[in-house]
Amino acid sequence: MAILLSPSSCLLFIIDKYRKNQTLKPPALDFSLIQPKLGFDLTKNLPYPYRPWQAGKYHMTMGIRKMAEEEWLELRTYLLETNRNGVMQCLPDAEEACEEALECIVAFLVRRYPSHFRLLRERPSYIHNSITNLTFKVTPPFEQHPLEIAAQLVMEDINLLLPGKGDHKDSQQYYLKASFSMVPAGWYIEERIGWPLWRIHSPIPMWNEKLRKSMEKFFLNLRVDSPVQRNNYFVQMDETMFQQEPFPDVVPHAIRPEDIRVRHERQTLRRLPCSGAVLFLVRTYLTPLVDLKEEKSNLYAFLSAIKAWPAEIARYKGRHVWGEVFEKWCQETLDGYVPEKPEARCDGVE
């Protein structure tokens, strides 16, 4: 029977093993100061109620916020399907970054969640995921691609972006070089792989004028010791998480308030120290609109934010499909309610 490392010694064991015979690399990022969540009970870990909107005038911003190191990766009681077709792409020049991303993810998980992720004492190159009861080799030679292994450990979609290698202008631009996307939102990763940031965001109205320069500058200046997070949201008509086709412009049936879902994302970005890649993780949540019935202040802000969308943003986000039903239900539910001070809450909005 395999022996598991004690929670407090996992990270130190990696470093010590490397020093003795170099079978493992030292972790690219140091998570030794993170407080472990001992005895963490997944069944009682409810999703954080992100409400990434604010009442009032529409502002297109990146909505970047500092992220505490221990908040980087969140857990849930299940993993999304990873055996779908067309969910993973990796260009040759991103292989090193994929390995580094896996190293960082493993180092974080065994430190933060030792009840669920442990290195095997007799096989220290292997990590055991007790959520799925699966074990993975996390050092070369790999038994699976590092990106595929990482996707079976974390709950987020994984993306790696690297700067161009051409002239000065190209080196200032970041390109999507690797991705494992289990929850696409209206696109195929096979089409997007290799695209620069500007092309990925080109369908978004106003992005080129409002955000392109600041986003490109952000990617150039992101520091290893300054990980960040942001949120965004839009609305859809069902429980579909794996959505490669564009969201429908019309629906063949009458929409009910119970059909409407708020699809919102928690995104984290951090620089990897060795490859220089930007590791961009996306965790997707679906919240039924009717679940906001008792959150009148949040619902008021949500209605206000959506009514404030400029026409081109409203069209892009599909308000013409669900807006009438949404607004009627909100107004009936609010029944004239106006908060004393409307919540000016913005967790990062595209």
Image (spheres, rainbow, N blue to C red):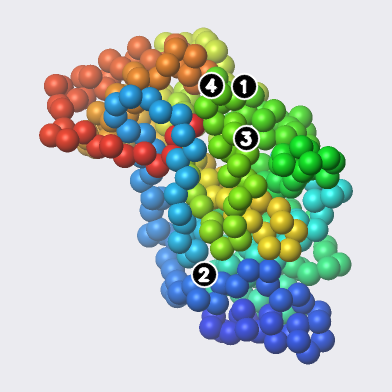
Question: Given this view, does label 4 or label 1 mark the residue nearer the observer?
Answer: 4
Camera-side residue of 211 and 312:
211
Judge from the rendering whether residue 236 lies leftward or rightward of residue 50; answer left or right: right
Question: Given this view, does label 1 or label 2 mark the residue nearer the observer?
Answer: 1
Q: Secondary structure at mark 2?
A: loop
Residue under pointer 3: 184
Q: How far, Cα to Cα, is label 4 from label 1?
A: 9 Å
Residue under pointer 1: 203
Q: Secondary structure at mark 3?
A: loop
Q: How far, Cα to Cα, is label 4 from label 2?
A: 41 Å
- How crowded is the residue under tag 3: few (<14 C-alpha within 10 Å), some, or many (20+)? some
Camera-side residue of 162 and 300:
162
Q: How far, Cα to Cα, is label 1 from label 2?
A: 39 Å
Amino acid, disc 3? Pro
Residue under pointer 4: 206
Question: Is 157 situated above or below 124?
Answer: above
